[in-house]
Image (cartoon, grey):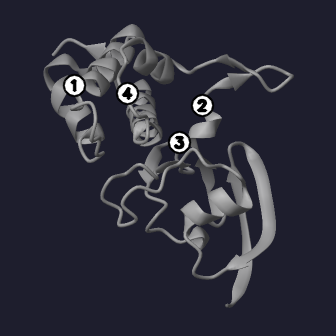
Amino acid sequence: MANRPLQLTLNGQTVGPVEVPNDLAMIDYLHEYQNLTGSRLGCGQGICHACVVIVDNPDGTSEEVRTCITGVHFFDGKKVRTIESHAKYDDAGNLSELNPIQQKFVDLFAFQCSYCAPGFVNAATVLVENAQRKPLKKSELQDTIEASLGHHICRCTGYVRYYNATREVLDDLGLVKEG
């Protein structure tokens, strides 16, 4: 198996350059090389979106990228955030605070088994970050949430709680305007 160097910023830390196989999927790199197992391998075909990470683009925008169907070398030189980057930890490594999306998902019991939760948290994070740059119109809010979260598959909850929690976070942060 041929290798080539990879360097990226992962959860704020520079990684590499490190030699990794050419055909390695990003999810396998995260799990096996970085011990970051929060992104979940669900379908392995890019359909369920449990495996998504956030890529921060040079222009300040962010986007979800599916890691089960995307090779690790696609991420070379990019800034990547996984689910592990959202919460805050104290100096001893203990959880001290969830981010607003995670907290609202917990408060509203948005998930049951939680297998899909990392993907939903990352999708809602991208939506919130986009809304911070350009607030959402109240008349378009439901459609925007559905467009952002609707491609994620959950077999437990029926999506309503995820959508409601995301709506509440957007409202709480003042990112929804009349119109």
Q: Would you say residue 2 is visible in this rendering?
A: yes
Residue 85 is marked as none
Image quarter where the C terminus lies is top left
Q: Position of residue 178 (x, y in %)?
A: 20, 11
Sequence order check: which comes first, mark 1 or mark 3?
Answer: 3
With respect to residue 140, does 4 lie above or below?
A: below
Image quarter where the N terminus lies is bottom right
CA–CA distance in space, label 2 to label 1: 22 Å
Q: Position of residue 10 (x, y in %)?
A: 69, 50
Find disc 4 in the rendering and name its residue.
Answer: 131
Sequence order check: which comes first, mark 2 or mark 4?
Answer: 2
Sequence order check: which comes first, mark 3 or mark 4?
Answer: 3
Q: Secondary structure at mark 1?
A: helix
Find disc 3 in the rendering and name its residue.
Answer: 60
Mark 4 neighbour density, 10 Å: few (under 14) some (14–19) many (20 or more): some
Q: Residue furthest bottom?
A: 1
Name the amino acid, label 3.
Answer: Gly
Find disc 2 in the rendering and name its residue.
Answer: 86
Q: Residue at x 55, y 70 (%)?
A: 25
Q: Position of residue 92 (x, y in %)?
A: 86, 23
Asked if the residue under mark 4 is in contact with the one under mark 2, i.e. CB atoms within 8 Å, the reply is no
> Which circle, 3 or 2, is nearer the viewer?
2
Find disc 1 in the rendering and name its residue.
Answer: 160
Q: Residue at x 43, y 42 (%)?
A: 119
Taking depth in this image into account, of 112 and 27 the one nearest to the observer is: 112
Name the amino acid, label 1.
Answer: Val
Q: Position of residue 97 (x, y in %)?
A: 64, 16
**In this rendering, position of residue 9 left or right of residue 62:** right
Residue 7, by quadrant, is: bottom right
Mark 2 neighbour density, 10 Å: few (under 14) some (14–19) many (20 or more): some
